[in-house]
Image (cartoon, rainbow, N blue to C red):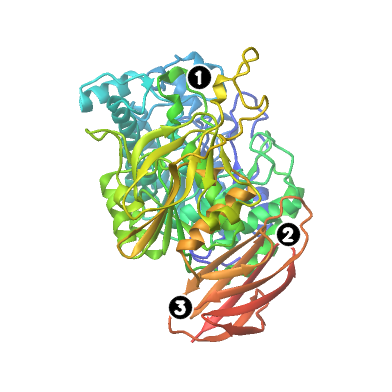
Amino acid sequence: MSQVTKWPDDVFRRLLVDMHVPDWHPDLLGRFDPVDCVATIARAGFQSYQQYAISCAGLCLWPTKVGEAHSNMGGRDYFGEVLEECRRHGLHTVCYFHVIWDNWAYEKHPDWRVRPAGGDDKIMQGRYGFACPNSPYRDYIRDLLRELVGSYEFEAIFVDMTMWPDVCYCTHCTARFWKEHDAEPPRIVDWNDPAWRIFQSARQAWLLDFVNDMTRTVKQIRPISVYHQFATVFHSWQLGAPLELAEACDFVTGDFYGGPASHSLVCKAYASLTRDRPFEMATSRTIGMTDHVTIKPKDQIRVESFVPTLHSAALMLIDAINADGTLNGEVYDFMRGLNAERAPYEEFLGGELLADVAIYYDKESMYNPDENGVHVAKVQAIDELPHRDALVGIANILREGHVPFGVVTNATLHQLGRYRAVIVPNVLEMKESQAAVFRQFVEDGGVLYASGPSSLDRFYEAGPRYLLEDVLGVRYMGTLGTRVTYLTPVDEAVAKTIWPQDHLIFGGAMIRAETLPEAEVLATVTLPFTAPEAGRAIGSRFAAIISDPPAVTAGSDPGIVVHSYGKGKAVWVAAPIESVAQQVNARLVLALLKRLLPAPYKFEAETHPSIEVTLFDQPENRRLLLGMLNMQSQPPAIPVGATIKVQLPYGRDPSGAFRIPDCEPLAFERAGPYVKIGFEPFETLAMALVEYE
């Protein structure tokens, strides 16, 4: 079969088969057949195959002289044989290379081990052994890469698990921290302690150093694509993987399991962070990585597989090898249908995502302030991340409200000029230089929405202050309330938005602030009638036994403030109400945004909230790519129609509209600055091209 696609530009259907299999029993990988394996994959319609070179077992699938080969290969070269079969079938060749999670290195080289604050017992209870990238393990990985990349020809290499599995206090990490900072690594998590913040920055710098070293090592041997695991994009501080890791990747990738809405947000973040396109989003064909056999329901996996298509991205499906090294051929018949459904859209994909609103994501804010004072050994997996909760909440609000949005990050803040508005949701960290970018954005005519502590500098010598107080129109004065607080409208439009409610509840404290001159207060903060923690069975010091109703007299502290600055405007909310998944919260956030950001938008949509809409500009082809994906949560999806209005680039006139992939003409009409198109009900995906002169 001749190869007709270019890597990675034209490769959208990609496959990885997990082979994390040890060799303690002769049956493990004993029946692996590269000829049958690759033929099965090729028949299923994949364009590339990512073959394991080394897994988290730490065993190599080629006859290595540096590491240890999987004994059940029996002297064969599984890796090399697979590459040869891929070339025979016209599949693009990608190497899978695993680091840090390395059982062989952990067992054979105790000095290389990650040493968590809780001691080795914390690791020995699990299946994984971790090697520290600050130890001589780093030299071993460099030598292994040189051998592998120097011995075989393949088009790309993916390095998995480039993250810290735990906070390491091994002799190598401790010595490096002493050398760089002349101090002992702290063991108490405290985001108000400069020493802890320095240590966390060091962990990130060490990981980046390791990642960049691997990329350089590969590139010095062959000019192939190199990319690293970047599923860490929305993970907490514990993994120590900053957004700058993307700079070591030709394009970004990561595997995710949160469902279509979560994957959509990932794609928008990746669109901001990737250097080359298409970026890649991966997910398993099973319901989870720990379930070896249960396939996701067809309706679910169809929608998940179309999320990357909606964002002009590649999909990496992940399967897992059977213990003996065989594949389930029936599964590949199933996946052939998915590939056949997605393939016809691929020739139309690409372009720049068009959006009016940017959500600002700050990786340095991915911690929970409530964990302060906890010993590192007692920190568990962090589920409550205030910034991430607000980020996900506002993404859902904008997606379901059909507001065109994208993502900018602390590593890509220079992209802010592409948008008309930016939302800064419950951001815990901000530097003066970042605040200056937001200030200039508003001064030039942009709209800024900020919630909670966003832009708070709590290390200012005179006391905590908002770096953007001149933009937001409020001065930070502390906090109000505890477990329950309320927003009470004083503005008629806000009151109508939340009607028939007269207050909006929030499960936590709010920011206490005072307004600057000319700032307009739209709502105030009202506390409960009595403090929620004051009620007792004896004494009856509460207003209601079950709930904490608001005080009879509304509070006077500002809760929602609008302020003009330069040519633009800002709206400040005393709490991250966008993180609360209630319809009334969504209505209020959308109303506040649209109050300051009038139409026209890049697109407007009259359709069900479950329909996500995206729009890409392809100026080289003088056309817009419009996509709609039905994300109904309860299968089977009910077909939904839509009327979409898209804004053409300035000064352009429409010349045609076509449904894809069949290129059937679509009726359209001019509607002011828009081109208006109606779509018949569709079950999952609908896409169209709007051509312009």
On residue 123, the disc is 1
Q: Is residue 62 visible?
A: no
Mark 2 or mark 3, which is nearer the start of the sequence? 2
Horizontal side of 162 relative to 55 (left or right) equals left
**Label 3 with label 2: CB-CB less than 8 Å:** no
| Residue at image point 59% right, 27% down | 23
| Residue type for callout 3 | Pro
On residue 649, the disc is 3
Q: Quadrant of the N terminus?
A: bottom right
How packed mark 3 is, by other alpha carbons closer than 10 Å (few <14, some 14-19, many 20 or more), is: some
In the figure, 121 relative to 320: above or below?
above
Q: Nearer the viewer, residue 680 or 183?
A: 680
Mark 2 or mark 1, which is nearer the start of the sequence? 1
| Residue at image point 50% right, 86% down | 653
In the figure, 6 relative to 183: above or below?
below
Whole-Å distance between the Cαs marked 3 and 1?
A: 56 Å
Q: Is residue 549 visible?
A: yes
User: Residue 284: where, in percent of width, then height?
Assistant: 63, 45
Whole-Å distance between the Cαs marked 3 and 2?
A: 37 Å
Give SS at disc 3.
Answer: loop
On residue 337, the disc is 2
Whole-Å distance between the Cαs marked 1 and 2?
A: 42 Å
Horizontal side of 620 relative to 334 (left or right) equals left
User: Residue 405: where, in percent of width, then height?
Assistant: 50, 60
| Residue at image point 22% right, 28% down | 180
